Image (cartoon, coloured by chain):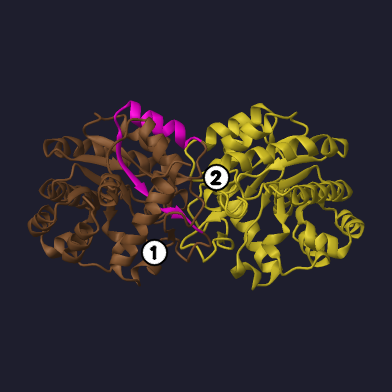
Chain colours: A yellow, B brown
């Protein structure tokens, strides 16, 4: 009976492979299956290295669906050759997503080009790329999912910093082409995020829901300081409830970049993720 | 004639003393006067150490007005004793501001109490403190200036993260009691900040305008990584023009926390600030 409950309450949990970066793809497939998971989120680099079709087969045979592929994007270059190369690379990413059977390509929009201070212009170049890629994505049954990143990444990684801004961009295009990602790590501080989640749900734009906690002090470079669920300041349960109220009943993906987790045994980390997910995300207060 | 122009175009420039932390208060007074400045921004700790009345006299005799005192705030504790202590400390800060002749006490609101995930509750405690302190401030001719800090400080320093949020708070109170601070370092990434500046101007809420640039990579702890004017991603001229269009013709205060500046000769740093201010803030494109 516990086993039964266990399986049921993991029905929506997806493990993003960056959370257990120490695992190879076969270890990921085996480890997730052994823990009773049904979903994983994958990254392009390890998938390409293993082979896209082989990775797709591996996950399928382990009973795992792929909830998202990370990541496309980096659309903000002004140089025409760089822009063309970025579009080509994103078409390849969409092909890979389709081959893996996921309907979601997560996009990190890109930062300011070196020396530029033109945030507005950079954001418009993101829109131009979405216009270019949208039909190509829809033909493959994959959606471009704009991920607003925390404002601390606005200059060097992503000029889209809030959910409202991501929705302003997405809503210029059909909902089957462009959606948004709600990642608690990036959005938890925003007092308007609840309205944004509701708006995303209403418009059918909520393409992915990702979890990580916010812990301080931030490390140098601020890239790898995400917290294990429950270790930080984010009210994860509130986010689950708000996304559900907005109609999201799809995967809940845990994506934590944290070198402390990567040093440990992968199965132990996954067991901890599951326990924290039950305590801090699922359990009613 | 150059001397004349020089004096005129520095009429609004204020040097926040943290930018040249290596200087004692007498060095600050002498150095600013020698460089043709008319304004400084001060911090409580060095002023208290030197003596509030002595510091006031020192600045007055150097022909310098004090544009702001940093800082009050830290209003988010739940413990009643800590809350009472914070209010007492802010009353003392208001007295000090009045003694220094400045009309602006900059407030850093405070972060989440240890273990708390209740951002909304913390923000309401900020409002309660403002209600308590507003009349005391107005009696002294000093305004409480809510400074929205970059969202990367939301958990540990300041639960007020955007200008819109600061204005939502400020507008619950009379404009002569509570205003807001526009600091480019904290707000540059926000695509709604232009509207916020206009709203602040319209309501007579723009209490202080501070400048620092945004440079990456951020250092560990993200406190001391602010950039010299012109070194980073912020369109400082745009901010000056927008604040002017909103009716702000008061001081423009340069406040840069950067250990690289503190290691250098203070006069050299100030000369660089002035040159950068002319090039990146004042000069029309």
Q: Name the residue that disc number 1 marks.
A: B258
Q: Nearer the viewer, mark 2 or mark 1?
A: 1
Q: CA distance from mark 2 to mark 1?
A: 28 Å
What subunit carries mark 2? A
What subunit carries mark 1? B
- Vertically, is A167 above or below B8? above
Q: Nearer the viewer, residue A105 or A248?
A: A105
Q: Which mark is residue A187?
A: 2
Residue A103 covered by magenta stretch = no
* Element marked by disc 2: helix
* Magenta region: B192-215
Residue B38, how many percent across, how many down?
Answer: 21, 50
Say which residue appears at 61% left-offset and 49% top-offset: A158
Crowd band around label 1 with a 10 angstrom C-alpha radius: few (<14), some (14–19), many (20+): some
Crowd band around label 2 with a 10 angstrom C-alpha radius: few (<14), some (14–19), many (20+): many
Residue A231, how many percent across, how many down?
Answer: 51, 59
Q: Nearer the viewer, residue A56 or B69?
A: B69
Say which residue appears at 83% left-offset and 66% top-offset: A26
Q: Which mark is residue B193?
A: none
- Vertically, is B219 above or below A89? below
- Residue at mark 2 shares a chain with residue at mark 1: no
Whether residue B63 can be seen here: yes
């Amino acid at each position: 009976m516990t086993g039964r409950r266990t399986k049921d309450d993991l029905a929506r949990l997806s493990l993003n492979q960056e959370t257990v970066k120490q695992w190879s793809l076969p270890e990921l497939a085996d480890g997730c299956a052994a823990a009773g998971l049904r979903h994983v989120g994958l990254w392009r680099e390890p998938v390409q290295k293993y082979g896209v079709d082989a990775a797709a087969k591996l996950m399928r045979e382990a009973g795992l669906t792929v909830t998202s592929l990370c990541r496309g994007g980096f659309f903000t270059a002004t140089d025409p050759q760089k822009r063309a190369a970025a579009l080509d690379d994103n078409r390849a990413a969409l092909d890979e997503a389709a081959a893996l059977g996921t309907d979601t390509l997560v996009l990190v929009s890109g930062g300011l080009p070196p020396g530029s201070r033109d945030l507005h212009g950079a954001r418009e170049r993101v829109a131009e790329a979405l216009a270019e890629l949208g039909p190509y994505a829809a033909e493959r049954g994959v959606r471009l999912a704009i991920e607003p990143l925390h404002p601390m990444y606005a200059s060097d990684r992503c000029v889209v910093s809030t959910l409202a801004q991501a929705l302003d961009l997405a809503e210029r295009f059909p909902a089957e082409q462009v959606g948004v990602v709600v990642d608690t790590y990036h959005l938890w501080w925003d007092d308007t995020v609840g309205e944004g989640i509701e708006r995303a749900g209403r418009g059918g734009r909520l393409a992915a829901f990702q979890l990580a906690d916010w812990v301080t002090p931030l490390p140098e470079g601020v890239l790898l300081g995400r917290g294990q669920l429950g270790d930080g300041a984010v009210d994860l349960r509130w986010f689950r409830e708000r996304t559900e109220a907005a109609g999201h009943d799809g995967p809940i993906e845990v994506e934590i970049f944290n070198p402390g987790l990567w040093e440990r045994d992968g199965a132990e980390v996954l067991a901890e993720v599951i326990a924290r997910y039950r305590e801090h995300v699922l359990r009613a207060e």
